[in-house]
């Protein structure tokens, strides 16, 4: 779809006042620009009864922060919106300014229960962008499920992660979090520990998924911080942790993590990934696998190493 075609579509969209759901896929559309997507934003804000929006802009390499500015403005009017998914993976012109503008729009979405934002390979995003996003998220008082991906955003460090965690404390309704910080190589044990302290406040959590693959400064101390948080979440049913290629992690770190997780009486699923963590031994990993399967509440265990 070209910008001109999108303009005509959006003119028709404005007339669909009773529309409740929009799903559009522009993935790898090299001919879509900020101009065309400005029309989309203007069309969306006229559809006041929208409950669900899914927009895929992955690898649209011509779009810039201007898109998020316009979409942020459009979102402000959607008081009935319950679900928002936006994929900006590999949109490499997106910066902190774009994230800030999107966050301003998020602040008004008091009815949103599910939010998914993907910024993989948007490597101009820094701690400042993550901080501003958190300021928008903490206003979403109905939020139950959140997916955030900053895979390969290598400028993100402990500062951004801890600011995000601090803002999440306000979301008492949150039941499920899925965060991807793979290849964010500036993250350290300190950031994970402080982030873990924030998780302890979210007592309603039932599912936690954290991906720190290739964050090679993380060691046993970081695992200890996460485990300490998880063991306090008494309603937790599902845990998925990815520490592939975190080569400083040893048997001792995994042992402490499993001991903490084993205290959760409602736990049904455990996924833990330590591929290419060379200091984890086969004998120990097999023992851990058996111990977790022995828990009375467990339905499925998936542990991978080697």
Image (tube, helix red, strand yellow):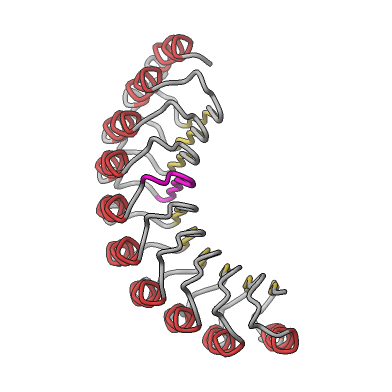
In the image, residue 84 lies at what x, y percent? 43, 41
Residue beneath the point at 49% across and 36% down: 54
Residue beneath the point at 26% across and 39% down: 101
Which residue is at the front of the view, 168 or 215? 215
In the image, residue 9 lies at what x, y percent? 46, 13
Residue beneath the point at 43% across and 44% down: 122
Task: Specify whether residue 17 is in view.
Answer: yes
State which quarter of the image contains the C terminus.
bottom right
Which residue is at the front of the view, 87 or 46? 87
In the image, residue 72 lies at what x, y percent? 30, 35
Left or right of 150 in this view: 250: right
In the image, residue 268 lies at what x, y percent? 63, 74
Q: Which of the 4 image quarters holds residue 229?
A: bottom left
- Give yes or no for residue 253 being in the magenta stretch: no
- Give yes or no for residue 121 being in the magenta stretch: yes
**Magenta stretch in the rendered image:** 113-124
């Amino acid at each position: 779809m070209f910008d001109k075609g999108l303009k005509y579509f959006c003119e028709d969209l404005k007339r669909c006042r009773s529309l409740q759901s929009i799903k559009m896929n522009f993935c790898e559309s090299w001919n879509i620009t900020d101009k065309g997507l400005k029309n989309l934003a203007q069309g969306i804000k006229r559809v006041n009864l929208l409950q669900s929006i899914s927009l895929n802009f992955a690898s649209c390499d011509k779009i810039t922060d201007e898109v998020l500015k316009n979409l942020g403005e459009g979102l402000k009017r959607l008081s009935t919106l319950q679900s928002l998914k936006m994929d900006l993976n590999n949109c490499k012109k997106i910066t902190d300014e774009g994230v800030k503008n999107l966050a301003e729009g998020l602040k008004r979405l008091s009815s949103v229960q599910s939010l998914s934002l993907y910024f993989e390979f948007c490597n101009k995003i820094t701690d400042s962008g993550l901080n501003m996003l958190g300021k928008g998220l903490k206003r979403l008082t109905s939020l139950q499920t959140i997916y955030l991906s900053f895979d390969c955003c290598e400028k993100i460090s402990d500062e951004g992660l801890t600011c995000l965690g601090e803002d999440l404390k306000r979301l008492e309704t949150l039941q499920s979090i899925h965060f991807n910080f793979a290849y964010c190589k500036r993250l350290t044990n300190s950031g994970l520990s402080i982030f873990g302290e924030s998780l302890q406040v979210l007592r309603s959590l039932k599912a936690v998924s954290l991906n720190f693959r290739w964050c090679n400064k993380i060691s046993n101390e970081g695992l200890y911080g996460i485990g300490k948080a998880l063991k306090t979440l008494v309603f937790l049913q599902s845990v998925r942790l990815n520490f592939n290629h975190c080569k400083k992690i040893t048997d001792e770190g995994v042992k402490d993590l499993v001991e903490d997780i084993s205290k959760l009486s409602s736990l049904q699923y455990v996924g833990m990934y330590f591929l290419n963590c060379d200091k984890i031994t086969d004998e120990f990993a097999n023992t851990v696998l058996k111990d977790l399967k022995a828990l009375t509440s467990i339905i499925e265990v998936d542990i991978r190493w080697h």
